[in-house]
Amino acid sequence: VDPADPMIVLFIVDNSYDYLAEGYSGVFLSTNGGDDWTRVLDVDPNYDSSMHRMYRHNIAADVASVADGRAQRWYVAFPNVGLFRSDDAGNSFSSTPIATLDGHATVYGVHTHPTDGQTVYVASSQGLLRSTAQGDGLAAFGDLPSGHVSSLAIDPTNPQTIYATILDGGLYRSTDGGASFELLRDFGAAR
């Protein structure tokens, strides 16, 4: 849901459970609260029910890009495909990814820095990735132990504080924008 206009919604559709809906996979946009939908990215979401949960955070609006009553920049990511960006308020996405996610069997979430308009994070089966150039140069980041980063949260009032969950490894916190993390609790965390 757009952070400035709740009538604007982006939605990922996958046909994994309905072979008749094969022509409807991709990213869709509604500007009227879901009454009407337009496909804005024709892509295979690469969903695999044996390893992916249905509820993922693979779409993110860049809150820092809000202008003219809506977010101007959006990101969406798919496992083993890539990270895509829209610079026209979600009306279209490039047909090719701005960053590849080959080898990332699962993408758990895409998150943007709440104020700088440049930084985007991707939590995946290959760890934490970051770009400081709106998705360009997306690369591994931070000193988290290896493993799935199954959840990520950025403090909206202090973006230097980031929380990350390592699947079956625990909860970590960074107070320096993700460069270094400390273990807060060692437990069989999932998300």
Image (cartoon, grey):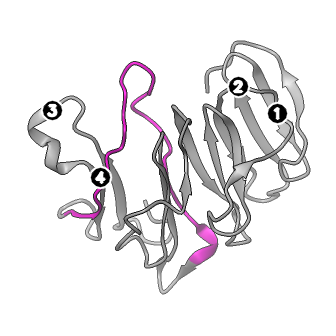
Amino acid type for the residue under numbered disc 2: Gly
Q: Secondary structure at mark 3?
A: loop
- Boundaries of the magenta span: 37-65
User: Quick check: marks 2 and 1 in contact, CB under 8 Å?
Assistant: yes
Quarter holding residue 42: bottom left
Query: Residue 165 placed where, x, y %?
Result: 71, 30
Q: CA distance from mark 3 to mark 4?
A: 14 Å
Q: Which residue is mark 2?
A: 147
Quarter holding residue 99: bottom right
The answer to if 72 sits in the magenta stretch is no
Q: Residue at x 74, y 36 (%)?
A: 164
Q: Which residue is mark 1?
A: 144
Q: Farthest residue in the left direction? A: 20
Q: Which residue is mark 4?
A: 26
Q: Is residue 135 left or right of residue 175?
A: left
- For label 1, the crowd category at 10 Å Cα-Cα, with few meaning under 14, some 14 to 19 and many 20 or more, is many
Which mark sits nearer the N-terminus, 3 or 4?
Answer: 3
